[in-house]
């Protein structure tokens, strides 16, 4: 079974909710899903053995959260080139973090990214969760074809 890692940094819970909805989409597409706060991933070995990676962060003062920055630096030490990837995040008014994560994963890590980051202003609605589930399915399709 193909495996996916979703790692996120959440400020008030919305990004975590999005992560769980993306996970539902990945699982529905037949993937084994592991969802972790980015701060719990501390070693290169923690990033190995997955077929797809989806990283997310809330946007706080125009930036991704520190644990996600640290995760991306750690991911740069692991060969993720060509692996399936996606990026996401919740935001209040500006929403820069998902795009910055996506660009890093694509250009620095050399990953096979879905068409763009998932940016959701709020994860409170069923519609937003449905968008996130669909995003998970699209990431899975990069692995499963």
Image (spheres, rainbow, N blue to C red):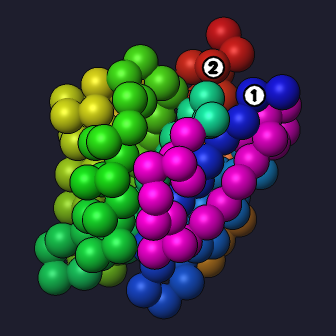
* Residue 75 shows in this picture: yes
Q: Is residue 43 magenta?
A: yes
Q: Is residue 123 left or right of residue 24?
A: left
Give the mark nearest the N terminus, 2 or 1.
1
Q: Is residue 33 above or below residue 29?
A: below
Could you say where residue 122 lies in the image, as x and y percent from the top left?
49, 74
Rendering coords of residue 106 (x, y %): 28, 31
Q: Could you classify mark 2 by the number of other residues whose Cα lies within 10 Å: few (under 14), some (14-19), or many (20 or more)?
A: some
The correct choice, above or below, for 131 with respect to 8 in the image is: above
Q: Which residue is mark 2?
A: 143
The quarter holding residue 138 reads: top right
Circle 2/circle 1 CB separation < 8 Å: yes
Where does the image place residue 53, in percent across and percent down from the top left?
Answer: 52, 41
The stretch in magenta equals 26-48
Q: Residues within 10 Å of mark 1 (few under 14, many from 20)?
A: some
Q: Residue at x 30, y 42 (%)?
A: 77
Closer to the camera in the image, 100 or 74 = 74
Q: Which residue is mark 1?
A: 2
Find numbered disc 2 in the image and state the secondary structure of the residue it sits on.
helix
Label count reads: 2
Residue 35 covered by magenta stretch:
yes
């Amino acid at each position: 079974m193909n495996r996916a890692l979703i790692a996120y940094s959440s400020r008030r819970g919305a990004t975590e909710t999005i992560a769980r909805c993306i996970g539902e989409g990945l699982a529905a597409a037949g993937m084994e899903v592991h969802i972790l706060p980015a701060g719990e991933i501390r070693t290169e070995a923690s990033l190995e053995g997955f077929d797809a990676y989806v990283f997310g962060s809330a946007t706080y003062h125009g930036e991704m959260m520190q644990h996600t920055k640290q995760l991306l630096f750690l991911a740069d030490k692991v060969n993720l080139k060509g692996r399936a990837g996606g990026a996401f995040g919740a935001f209040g008014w500006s929403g820069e973090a998902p795009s910055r994560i996506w660009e890093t994963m694509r250009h620095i890590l050399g990953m096979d990214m879905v068409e763009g980051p998932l940016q959701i202003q709020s994860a409170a609605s069923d519609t937003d969760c449905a968008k996130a589930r669909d995003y998970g399915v699209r990431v899975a399709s990069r692995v499963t074809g």
